[in-house]
């Protein structure tokens, strides 16, 4: 779940997923054309999505086509649904913005925990 959460934490990757959500199968070039960033940067985003399992790719001739595999979102969606199960209406989040904020917080917390400790200064 952490790999999927990290993958969707980036707005470019979320936009790519939205482009693919209706069953679209798009080439890397078509996806790259929709962004104001370099093609290598888009390729890196696609690699992260592919490695997280959120997209699958197929090479046809010299082109690589991408399609969404939304099944990897299920565990994350189930975790997010836990926040909607409060008995008190005032405790329930008002929408996806709260869920995504909680997800972003979790991603940053996980990254912080994985960082190697900083070297201590020599005070001699």
Image: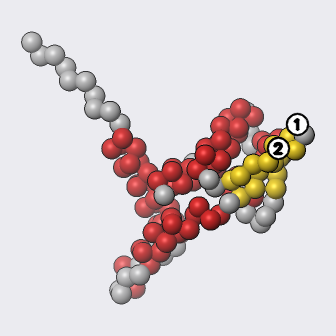
Residue, x 28% and y 28% (percent of image)?
A: 118
Task: Judge from the rendering whether residue 60 lies leftward or rightward of residue 8; answer left or right.
Answer: right
- Quadrant for residue 47, please give it: top right
Pick whichever, 55 or 91, lies toward us: 55
Task: Judge from the rendering whether residue 58 lies leftward or rightward of residue 93; answer left or right.
Answer: right
Q: Is residue 23 above or below residue 16?
A: below
Q: Which residue is mark 1?
A: 62
Q: Is residue 77 above or below residue 15?
A: below
Q: Which residue is mark 2?
A: 59
Residue farthest to the right, as pictured: 61
Report the quarter where the C terminus lies.
top left
* Mark 1 neighbour density, 10 Å: few (under 14) some (14–19) many (20 or more): few
Q: How far, Cα to Cα, is label 1 from label 2?
A: 7 Å
Residue, x 19% and y 20% (percent of image)?
A: 121
Number of disc labels: 2
Residue 34 visible somewhere in the drawing: no
Instruction: Residue 80: give x, y in percent of width and height.
Output: 47, 69
């Amino acid at each position: 779940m952490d790999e999927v959460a990290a993958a969707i934490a980036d707005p470019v990757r979320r936009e790519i997923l939205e482009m693919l959500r209706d069953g679209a199968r798009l080439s890397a070039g078509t996806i790259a054309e929709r962004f104001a960033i370099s093609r290598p940067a888009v390729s890196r985003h696609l690699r992260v999505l592919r490695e997280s399992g959120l997209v699958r790719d197929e090479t046809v001739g010299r082109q690589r086509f991408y399609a969404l595999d939304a099944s990897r979102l299920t565990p994350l969606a189930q975790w997010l649904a836990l926040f909607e199960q409060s008995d008190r209406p005032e405790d329930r989040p008002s929408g996806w913005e709260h869920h995504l904020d909680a997800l972003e917080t979790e991603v940053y917390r996980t990254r912080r925990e994985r960082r190697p400790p900083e070297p201590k200064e020599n005070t001699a």
